[in-house]
Image (cartoon, rainbow, N blue to C red):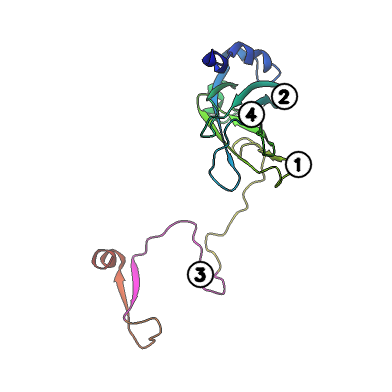
């Protein structure tokens, strides 16, 4: 009986999510998976027996799934409807993931609401949740996940100069790791300005010294 309570009724999900704005291929809808892990804020102590409610962003008043965390703070892994798998394989104007709200409550803790958790087809989304004690955050916590950077409309990246100007310290921040051909080896302590500097091939230095 317990396993039957945790099973996922795909037909029920389909009826609950028909209002999601996808193209008409509802028969080809895929499913993604979700697992929630709940711990206490500021540590890794799990919160057991927490109630986790899953709702659709298009119908936040209807609970699709209600789960309970186990002794290590994990919910069962469940399946949730997601857009067709093909939408996530190449750039498209159609959102390739489904969005859900996750509300978590537990005795002695303030509630946590996550809006816009993203579920991709044929993969498992792992959602960590950190809960504060009731006296820490009396109004609860709300987290809103913005659109994915590969799909949402964000301003273009500001162009950067390839050669960075030096700062007062003389340090230069490079765009990528550069392996030098030569390194300067100071033959003495850093404070000894009379010691000689030797230019050594980087490969020889690494081989013989490091």
Residue that label 2 marks: 58
- Check disc 1 and report its element: helix, strand or loop: loop
Crowding at mark 3 (Cα within 10 Å: few <14, some 14-19, many 20+): few
- Check disc 2 and report its element: helix, strand or loop: loop
Give the residue at x 63% y 52%: 158
Corner quadrant of residue 91: top right
State whether residue 188 is above or below residue 157: below
Circle 2 or circle 3, nearest the eye: 2
- Check disc 3 and report its element: helix, strand or loop: loop
Which label sits on residue 139? 1
Q: Are marks 2 and 4 in contact (CB under 8 Å)?
A: no
Q: Residue 92: image x %, image y %? A: 60, 28
Q: Are marks 3 and 4 in contact (CB under 8 Å)?
A: no
Q: Is residue 174 magenta?
A: yes
User: Of marks 2 and 4, which one's residue comes earlier in the chain?
Assistant: 4
Left/right placement of residue 58 relative to residue 167 reads right
Left/right placement of residue 92 relative to residue 187 reads right
Residue that label 3 marks: 171
């Amino acid at each position: 009986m317990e396993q039957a309570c945790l099973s996922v009724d795909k037909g029920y999900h389909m009826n609950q999510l028909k209002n999601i704005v996808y193209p008409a291929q509802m028969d080809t809808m895929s499913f993604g998976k979700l697992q929630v892990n709940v711990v206490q804020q500021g540590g890794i102590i799990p919160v057991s027996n927490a109630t986790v409610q899953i709702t659709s962003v298009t119908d936040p008043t209807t609970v699709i799934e209600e789960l309970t965390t186990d002794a290590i703070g994990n919910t069962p892994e469940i399946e949730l409807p997601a857009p067709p798998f093909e939408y996530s394989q190449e750039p498209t104007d159609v959102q390739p993931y489904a969005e859900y709200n996750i509300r978590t409550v537990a005795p002695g803790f303030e509630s946590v609401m996550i809006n816009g958790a993203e579920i991709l087809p044929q993969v498992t989304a792992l959602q960590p949740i950190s809960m504060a004690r009731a006296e820490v955050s009396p109004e609860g916590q709300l987290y809103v996940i913005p659109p994915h950077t590969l799909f949402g409309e964000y301003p273009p990246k500001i162009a950067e100069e390839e050669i960075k100007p030096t700062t007062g310290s003389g340090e230069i921040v490079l765009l990528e790791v550069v392996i030098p051909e030569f390194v300067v080896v100071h033959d003495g302590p850093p404070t000894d300005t009379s010691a000689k500097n030797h230019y050594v091939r980087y490969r020889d230095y690494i081989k013989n010294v490091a």
